[in-house]
Image: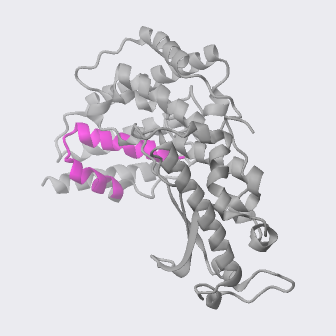
Amino acid sequence: MTTDRVDLPELSRLTWRDLDPAARPAFDPGGVAELVRVLPPATEVPPPGTDWRLIDFWYDRMTEALVEHLGNWVVGWWYTVAIEDYPERGVVPVWRAERPPVTTPDETLTRLADAVVAWHELLVELATDPHGRFAERAPAAADGTDEPPAWRAVRGNGWITVYTTAQDDRLPYPSRLSWADTDPPDRVFAPDTVRAVVDDLLAAFELPSHEADWRLKDLWLENVSAGLVDRYGLWAVGWRWSVGEGDLDGGPVGSWCYFSHSVTTPEATATTISAALLEWRDWLDDLAERFDRFLPLPTDDLDGWERAVAHLVTAVGDRTQYESGWYRCCRTVLGWFLDAAGIESTRREQLLEHAVAGRFDSWVEPPRAVVASVAENLARRVAVDHA
């Protein structure tokens, strides 16, 4: 067992033979609480307030240890299932996956043990369906199968899984920034300080290995971003908005791609991150200059609005190379332009939805006629709104 990754069987790939409680007659529900407390990860219960990724990962480590002692069946300890009338799906089996909250070590381990026992009891119920909750909805058995009707019921008829995980990211996606966030009037940015700041961050947050669990890598990236934001301002979150199918998909930054591609040695990684932040800042400064060419812009100047929008669409396309998701960056930039032009926030999304939504595709440079149509549509709607 390693401490930076886990290898768990997937519940969806297990058969009834893997889960059948009849195959483990010696299982003692009364001994689960003691077993949970002697597992190695039980000494490392995260304190309340720990980042959700570390809590999630710790639960996976506990599950890995439980699997070693009890078998693959226990991997489903955090699941429940019921036949529900689910919105837009009708009456289907709904699996719900939710890990207990982390409080004190004793309470947390008790909840985990109780959940393991409850999962075992659910499997016993699925084996026999004594309360008749499931079997009546079971599809016909396949030839030669030994699956009980209740199990067939909860694994058939369009079953879905609902995951409940508290994902409280500290930082916004770059597209959620306002234009004021990207260029605050009190901003003081010295490019020659970037490398030293990045070096300090990499010294403070140890690089995960390429084989580490994705949550550990994701948290490391967020810690780096948070450090850059603390030093330079909220605009710095965009350093990872990479061209194409990178970390954040469809952005203007070519220096950074994603963890396994861009993280190598600490020194080389610091160089890459520094270049990415400077490239992102350069893009924002470039946009500010482009905005200044057109603003202020009267709302009834249709030709001026059309020229501005077409120019910005082309600029974004050139920078993103029309790669995967480039239209998201395009929509963001047009939203910033509307913001800078003084268009009210309550109207910007509606304007962009009507003018841009569905007009552009990944990996495709739009024909000039489409760009002109988008520009004309947006210009006319701005004019009508302020007529």
| Residue 283 seen | no
- Direction left: furthest residue: 387
Q: Position of residue 48 (x, y in %)?
A: 43, 41
Task: Name which residue lies at 45% across and 26% down.
Answer: 280
Tell me what residue is drawn at x 66 percent, y 68 percent: 120
Task: State whether residue 382 appears in this view.
Answer: yes
Magenta region includes residue 331: yes
Which image quarter is the N terminus in? top right
In the image, residue 219 lies in the stretch drawn in magenta: no
In the rendered view, does 288 fall on the left or right side of 9?
left
- Pick the residue in front: 216 or 115: 115
State which region is magenta.
325-353
Given residues 81 and 62, the one toward you in this image is 62
Q: What's the residue at 45%, 58% (across, down)?
A: 358
**Residue ranking furthest to the right:** 144
Q: Quadrant of residue 289?
A: top left
Is 78 on the left-hand or right-hand side of 373? right
**Residue 202 in the image, given as x and y percentages of width and height:** 54, 18
Identity of the residue drawn at 42% across and 10% down: 193
Residue 11 in percent (x, y) is at 69, 62
Please say which color scheme the image uses: one colour
Foreground residue among 282 and 184: 184
To which quarter of the image does residue 350 belong?
A: bottom left
Give left or right: position of 195 versus 207. Answer: left
Residue 311, compared with residue 285, is above or below; it is below
